[in-house]
Amino acid sequence: MARIGFIGLGIMGSPMAANLVKAGHQVRGYDHHEENMAKLEAAGGTAAGSVAEAVRGAEVVATMLPDSPQVSEAVLGPGGVFDTLSGDGMARGVLYIDFSTISPVVSRELARAGADVGVHVLDAPVSGGETGAIEGKLSIMVGGDTAAFDAAQPVLQAVGTTLALVGLHGAGQVVKAANQLVVGGIYGLICEAIVLMEASGVDAKAGLDVLAGGLAGSRILELKRASMLARQFKPGFRLDLHHKDMG
Ligand code: NAD
């Protein structure tokens, strides 16, 4: 069981941190928003006052932040993860796992900067949404070296069920981009199918039910068709983040 510093406790990070606590890890977390830290404390973790305070003395550091600029600032910036760990002389051998969806170019920069101070870095973006994060059943696509992937197993297995090392640093982010193309594309097509059926006076619910059982069937059709038909727009994933991924 590890001492984990967890940065970014939003829709995904909050339940992931809670599952790490459940698995027996000591989790010290930091997020810009107070209410997210309260959730971590309620789950049995410890709230820190800054990135530096969250990662000091950690064996594993995890980030679950919106995009490349936030990850770069939290990890490479002054008072950030690498600065803090190397300033304390505690960087060597630490494992840093970035669960955020960011640019593969930035993932490779993080890996190089980590290697300079002795930190092993993995890019490990996830798929499965808020439900997958709550249930600890995420799919995780990992880029990095095999030794770090093996060392990360106790952490990855606490938050995910489908874990794959897909290549070197940045490869996880490339696979995640492919994932988002498929997810975004299917959402768009289901919307078109609903519009077509409704505009033609066809029962769209019966139509989608039969589509779900045929070759057009998909996990998105299975899980989301009812809320799409009902025009429920409560976000589990912010639209600007999906736009970022398509970019
Ligand atoms: P979110 O906006 O709910 O959470 C991000 C959190 O990071 C926020 O709570 C914010 O306060 C915090 N934050 C931002 N900058 C910070 C900093 N410098 N230091 C500390 N905290 C900071 O987003 P999310 O939905 O949890 O997504 C996180 C990442 O996971 C994104 O890259 C997203 O693309 C990816 N993702 C999301 C989903 C989903 O369904 N929500 C699924 C898979 C992957």
Image (cartoon, rainbow, N blue to C red):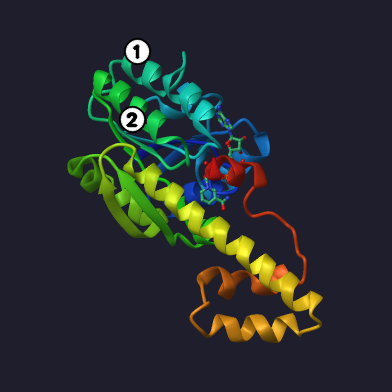
Q: Residues within 10 Å of mark 2 (few under 14, many from 20)?
A: many
The number of callouts visible is 2
Where in the image, quadrant-wise, is ligand 1 located? Answer: top right
- In the image, taking residue 144 as reference, residue 244 lies left or right, namely right
Does 106 appear above or below 36?
Answer: above
Does 7 appear above or below 231?
Answer: above
In what quadrant of the picture does the C terminus appear?
top right
- In the image, taking residue 125 as reference, residue 41 lies left or right, namely right
Q: Specify the quadrant of the image occupied by residue 107.
A: top left
Near-viewer residue (116 or 26): 116
Does 89 appear above or below 203?
Answer: above
- In the image, taking residue 165 as reference, residue 125 lies left or right, namely right
In the rendered image, residue 52, in percent from the top left (x then y), is placed at 46, 22
Question: Which residue corresponds to the image point at 39% horizontal and 16% vertical from the top-left?
Answer: 83
Q: Which residue is mark 2?
A: 108
Type of the residue with mark 1: Gly
Question: Which residue corresponds to the image point at 56% horizontal and 25% vertical from the top-left?
Answer: 49
Q: Residues within 10 Å of mark 1 (few under 14, many from 20)?
A: few
In the rendered image, residue 30, in percent from the top left (x then y), is placed at 54, 32
Q: Nearer the viewer, mark 2 or mark 1?
A: 2
Question: Which residue corresponds to the image point at 62% horizontal and 30% vertical from the top-left?
Answer: 32
Q: Which residue is mark 1?
A: 87
- In the image, taking residue 225 as reference, residue 94 lies left or right, namely left
**Ligand 1 neighbours mark 1 (CB distance < 8 Å):** no
Can I make out residue 23 in this image? no
